[in-house]
């Protein structure tokens, strides 16, 4: 991508009432190295729905031309739903073959067939926002099997100057700003909620809000962060997080599936986890033959602490849970089908965070003000009611899930605890609620029976063994941080036995959000 600033199209038709556009997520998961959501565009006449991966560092629309190989060889079979058949569109206007900004795996230039065609964005109410004669590139399916949607508002220079999708929508007043919000979706979680992509806004139901903003890189116009800490189950790795001067700059690049990290971190991870080189994909695969080390690390999480720069005091922490560290990979991208650790094994110093990072992160970018935000992703189904517009220069203000009822962005921000505070306070609140509930439960038993607990429980079962009661917190909506759900809280009980029918069940709703709840119950008597 060029190092130019965003194009300066004047949005003559833009209106203050323009609303964000929600791109529909794919019905399936895509990827030969991990699985992630695609998002659909309608291209051509008649419209062909093409699923594409969003790109944080590109500006064009890149499809895969199915007609160039006829679907008869293995490469074409791997294309999945990224394909667009240019020959089937009556409105396709071919411009010619030109280099593309998408590079091959060896960093060599990619040549694509470029043309103009209609591009539509179908909304949930079945209305379509359409652009006529928009620039579209198409790769030969024998050489490239994935399609991409560039999100950067920069023009493409071919035999003329062609605006990006974001620029075109903004210039025609179809979105409120050159901005977007995105999370890649996490196929490894129980509920398998797909990703979310909003143009001109953000989905407030898909992240934990914070007030930390960062500036886009002035040279490349890309989101870059400083790695301030890298932790495995809370323990710092390679001295990062303990030495203030030991930081690295990382680019957030959704073209890459995994992460490319400094060699010190890679070496430390290789020593901690049972992984080995996967030579074809230049990554690492899990060695399940080493059962001892696998059992020691199978529930391990990784935490990245990030900031706008090495001198910034404001940081955001993103957890990669155990599921994110085991990514299914298929041939021909790997020697044989296996599970990959999301880490590149190259020696490149182009450090980056790819789609696996964005599976657990919600990123929102406001190009008009050259800033972005990173937040911990929430894995609940997207709801159009939670989508809010990002007006130019109002990235933080757009965090309110109901802006019409908000008095100010500052008030909205102050009503929500910080991410770190939430992690500390929430478990304590749950602990005290459980303790109170258990106390009331036992007191109730005592009051009703008018006798000691020991005698009462003895009457229930007639047994004399000494049990221990365990209370387990279950995150039924996958909303709680993975590092404290479920949580076992042993309760010492000087009693003889307890009937399984006496299981305690409490439901606790988290505030201020009502999206999730916690079921608390006695899960086991031992």
Image: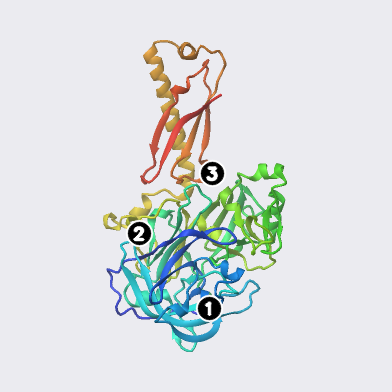
Check the picture and name the quadrant holding the C terminus.
Answer: top right
**Who comes first in sequence, dot 1 or dot 3?**
1
Distance CA(mark 3)–CA(mark 2): 28 Å
The vertical placement of 168 against 398, above or below, is below
Distance CA(mark 1)–CA(mark 2): 31 Å
The residue under label 3 is 483
- Left or right of 276? Residue 161 is left
Picture quadrant where residue 127 is located = bottom left
Q: Which colour assignment does the render follow? A: rainbow
Check the picture and name the quadrant holding the N terminus.
Answer: bottom right
Task: Give me the residue at 50% from left, 74% from top.
Answer: 62
Q: Nearer the viewer, residue 428 or 98?
A: 98
- Where's residue 450, x and y in %? 39, 10
| Element at label 1 | loop
The vertical placement of 262 against 161, above or below, is above
- Where's residue 508, x and y in %? 39, 36
The residue under label 2 is 387
Let me know if residue 101 appears in the view. Answer: no
In this view, the mark in front (1 or 2):
2
Picture quadrant where residue 256 is located = bottom right
**Who comes first in sequence, dot 3 or dot 2?**
2
Q: Nearer the viewer, residue 501 or 392?
A: 501
| Element at label 3 | helix
**Who comes first in sequence, dot 1 or dot 2?**
1
The residue under label 1 is 3
Distance CA(mark 1)–CA(mark 3): 40 Å
- Where's residue 228, x and y in %? 58, 57
């Amino acid at each position: 991508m060029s190092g130019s600033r965003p194009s300066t199209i004047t949005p003559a038709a833009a209106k203050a009432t323009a609303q964000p556009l929600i791109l529909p997520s794919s019905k399936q998961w895509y990827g030969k190295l991990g699985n992630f959501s695609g998002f659909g565009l309608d291209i051509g006449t008649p419209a062909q729905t093409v699923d594409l991966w969003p790109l944080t560092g590109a500006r064009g629309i890149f499809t895969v031309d199915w007609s160039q190989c006829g679907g008869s060889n293995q490469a074409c079979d791997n294309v999945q739903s990224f394909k667009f058949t240019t020959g089937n569109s009556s409105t396709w206007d071919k411009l010619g073959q030109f280099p593309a900004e998408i590079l091959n795996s060896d960093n060599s230039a990619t040549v694509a067939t470029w043309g103009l065609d209609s591009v539509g964005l179908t909304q949930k109410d079945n209305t379509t926002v359409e652009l006529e004669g928009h620039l579209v590139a198409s790769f030969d399916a024998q050489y490239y099997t994935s399609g991409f949607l560039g999100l950067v508002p920069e023009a493409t220079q071919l035999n003329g100057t062609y605006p990006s999708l974001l620029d075109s929508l903004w210039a025609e007043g179809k979105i409120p700003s050159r901005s977007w919000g995105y999370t890649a979706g996490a196929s490894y979680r129980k509920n398998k909620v797909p990703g979310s992509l909003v143009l001109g806004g953000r989905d407030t139901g898909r992240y934990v809000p914070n007030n930390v903003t960062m500036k886009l890189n002035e040279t490349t116009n890309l989101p870059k962060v400083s790695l301030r800490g890298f932790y495995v189950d809370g323990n710092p790795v390679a001295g990062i997080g303990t030495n203030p001067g030991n930081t690295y700059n990382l680019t957030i690049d959704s073209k890459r599936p995994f992460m490319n990290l400094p060699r010190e971190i890679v070496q430390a991870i290789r020593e901690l986890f049972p992984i080995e080189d996967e030579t074809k994909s230049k990554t690492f695969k899990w060695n399940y033959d080493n059962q001892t080390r696998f059992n020691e690390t199978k529930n391990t999480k990784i935490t990245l602490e990030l900031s706008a720069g090495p001198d910034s005091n404001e940081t955001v922490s993103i957890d990669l849970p155990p599921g994110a560290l085991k990514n299914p990979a298929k041939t021909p991208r790997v020697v044989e089908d296996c599970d990959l650790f999301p880490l590149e094994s190259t020696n490149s110093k182009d450090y980056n965070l790819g789609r696996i990072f964005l599976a657990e992160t919600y990123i929102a970018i406001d190009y008009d003000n050259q800033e972005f935000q990173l937040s911990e992703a929430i894995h609940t189904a997207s709801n159009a009611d939670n989508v809010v517009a990002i007006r130019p220069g109002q990235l933080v203000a757009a965090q309110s899930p109901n802006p019409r009822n908000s008095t100010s962005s500052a008030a909205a921000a102050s009503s929500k605890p910080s991410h770190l505070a939430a992690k500390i306070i929430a478990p304590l609140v749950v602990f005290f609620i459980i303790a109170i509930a258990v106390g009331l439960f036992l007191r109730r038993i005592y009051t009703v029976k008018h006798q000691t607990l020991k005698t009462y429980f003895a009457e229930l079962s007639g047994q004399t063994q000494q049990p221990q009661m365990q209370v387990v917190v279950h995150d039924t909506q996958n909303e709680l941080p993975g590092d404290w759900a479920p949580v076992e809280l042993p309760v010492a009980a000087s009693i003889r036995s307890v009937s399984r029918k006496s299981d305690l069940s409490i439901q606790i709703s988290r505030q201020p959000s009502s999206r999730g709840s916690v079921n608390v119950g006695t899960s086991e008597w031992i």
